Amino acid sequence: MGSDKPGMTMGSPAQKTGFAAIGLSAVLFLFSATWAALPLVIFVLLCAAASFSPRSSFFLPVISRGHTGQKAVALTFDDGPDPLTTPQLLDVLARHGMKATFFVSGQSAERYPEWIELILSRGHLIGNHSYSHSPFLMLCRFEKLFLEIATAQDIFKKLGILPFAFRPPVGLTNPKLGLVLSQLGMICVTFSCRAYDRGNRQIQGMARKILRKVRPDDILLLHDVRPSKVNDIPYWLHEVESILSGLTGEGFSVLPLDELVGRPVMTFCRKEGS
């Protein structure tokens, strides 16, 4: 499953910084034990900051935006599908002629295989969002992290798809993730523009927040789960409509994620058991 001592991706900035911190600490120890601790403390703080930065490639290569050089963005939706919201969202996307990528947990794919098929039939892409979508996933040991992502992959294979893109829950990373994804032949895709909607628990002003800061080659993060109050679904749909029409009005084109980042996000495969 993995090496005996899984850790940071070989040659990653984190590994190089760690070695440098140890070397500098050894030199400073010759003069002062107190000063010797400083490089190690700084390294630990850097690791903590990098873990909470969705755009950081400190531990592993992270794709958080495209590199087309065009005035283009990609739409991504996390945490669905949801029978109350995803079908309506698909209709909104169809009206605007836009394609999106849905990062789905293995549990959701198991529960709603029919909605996965609908998403795919509309020409959208599916990415791996772990099996359980635990916000504490990056605190798990290597074996648990591997199992979470690999189990979701097995579920997607049964549905006839093989995702290459993994989006960590909450956008967090850790030193073990690079090795896990390398063994599974996957890439880490996060985001560069979000509405801070807290998984559709805070949907007020989503369009304004997105359109105020969107830039060319951004990967937009949105969610397709129902809002905290079911009665707010029409308002949420209105906000999504405003985002899509606003992007068009400001001259942005919306590209599929694989086109924006120049890497395949998923492929179709033979359904297991068929």
Image: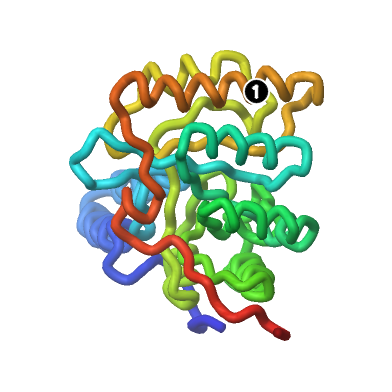
Side (left or right) of 198 relative to 207: right
Quarter of the image with the N terminus is bottom right
**Residue 217 in view (yes/no):** yes
Q: Position of residue 238 (x, y in %)?
A: 61, 19
**Residue 147 in view (yes/no):** no
Q: Position of residue 45 (x, y in %)?
A: 41, 43
Q: Image quarter for residue 118?
A: bottom right
Q: Secondary structure at mark 1?
A: helix
Q: Position of residue 199 (x, y in %)?
A: 64, 34
Side (left or right) of 69 relative to 113: left
Q: How many marks?
A: 1
Q: Image quarter for residue 188?
A: bottom left
State the colouring used for the structure image: rainbow
For image coordinates 51% across by 26% down, the residue present is 195
Q: Position of residue 48 (x, y in %)?
A: 46, 44
For image coordinates 41% across by 32% down, the residue present is 193
Q: Nearer the viewer, residue 193 or 113?
A: 113
Side (left or right) of 74 relative to 144: left
Question: Mark 1: which amino acid?
Answer: Trp
Q: Nearer the viewer, residue 25 or 93?
A: 93
For image coordinates 51% across by 45% down, the residue present is 171
Q: Label 1 crowding class (10 Å Cα cut-off): few <14, some 14-19, many 20+? A: many
The residue that label 1 is drawn on is 236
For image coordinates 67% across by 70% down, the residue present is 159
Quarter of the image with the C terminus is bottom right
